[in-house]
Structures are given as C-alpha cells and as structure tokens.
Amino acid sequence: MTLNQIVARIKAIAEAHEQINTSVFGDIDDKLRQDIIYPACFMPYPITNVQGVDKLLQCNLFIMDRLIIGGSVTDNTYNELEVTSDMTSVAEDLFAQFAYQKYNPTWNVQRNFNITPLNETAPDYLAGVQLSFTIKLPYTADRCQVPTNYIYGS
C-alpha cells in the first residue's frame, strides 16, 4: 500500500463524516493560509519507521473548528470546551472507521491511539484535537522490484 493510497483512504473516510467540511493533506501551516470551511481535518506527512518486516506509519490528524471570538464563559458564549468535545467525538468516529479490519486486511490500524486537545490562534481562532495512530504494513525489502542496474559483487 503506497502513501498515495493511504492518504486517499484517510481523506475519503474523513470527508464522508458529516461533521467534516474540509480534509487536506500536507504542511499544516500552508493549509491554514487557504480558504478552509470548518470543521476541518488536516493530515501532515506520516512518520515512517521500519521494524523488521513491519513498516509503521505514525499518522497525526488535526481535527479543528472555529471558536466564537469575544465570548464569555459566564454567558456560555465562549465555546472552546464544546468545540473540543465535538472534535474529540469526531476523532473517535474516524478512528473507528480506520480500525475496521474488514475494510481491507492489508490496512492494519493498530488499536492504540491518542487524542490530545489543542488550540490555534493564527490565522483563525481554532480548537480541536490531534488524533495520533499507527498503521502497520508489511515491509518485504524486495530488492528485485528496485529500478536499478547496480551489479552486486563488483
């Protein structure tokens, strides 16, 4: 399974969620400067580690929504807690979809995940969560498929 296929699957699942309006892949700082319709799901490049015959992709999704600016906690018009709560529920929903093993047996999402609350003030006032999880794929180190003309033993 290639990075393109993984990104396409994550974007498809995120965009199918009724609370996500925008799903983007790549450098988050660049994406935040675009016109985004919130709530949004941002996915930077995953970190890849190889452990023996396993390739582990550490994925981080940032699921964010806008805050009401100038709100008051006492008047219940400041909604950071509500936004964080909603985005936590969305993160849990997305993970449940990612972890569905009958979807594709080569798509092995590890059952452990983390949800971390966060907020961002520039360029928009946002709150939400970071969903961190790992996808385990087979790594065969198949040198026969490498496009090379290197001759071993010379």
Image: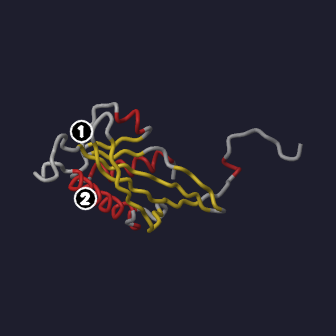
Position of residue 54 measured from the top left corner of the image (x, y, whole percent): 60, 61
**Residue appearing at x 61%, y 58% in the figure:** 139
Label 1: which residue? 37
Amino acid type at image mark 2: Ser
Q: Earlier in the sequence, mark 2 or mark 1?
A: 1
Query: Observer-nearest residue: 154 or 70?
Result: 70
Give the quarter of the figure containing the C terminus: top right
At x 25%, y 48%, the residue is: 20
Does 121 appear above or below 99? Answer: above
Instruction: Give the label, 2 or 1, closer to the camera.
Output: 2
Q: Residue furthest front?
A: 74
> How many circles with numbers are drawn on the protein?
2
Residue type at the position of mark 1: Ile
User: Mark 2 sits on what residue?
Assistant: 85
Q: Is residue 126 left or right of residue 71?
A: right
Q: Is residue 44 above or below residue 134?
A: above
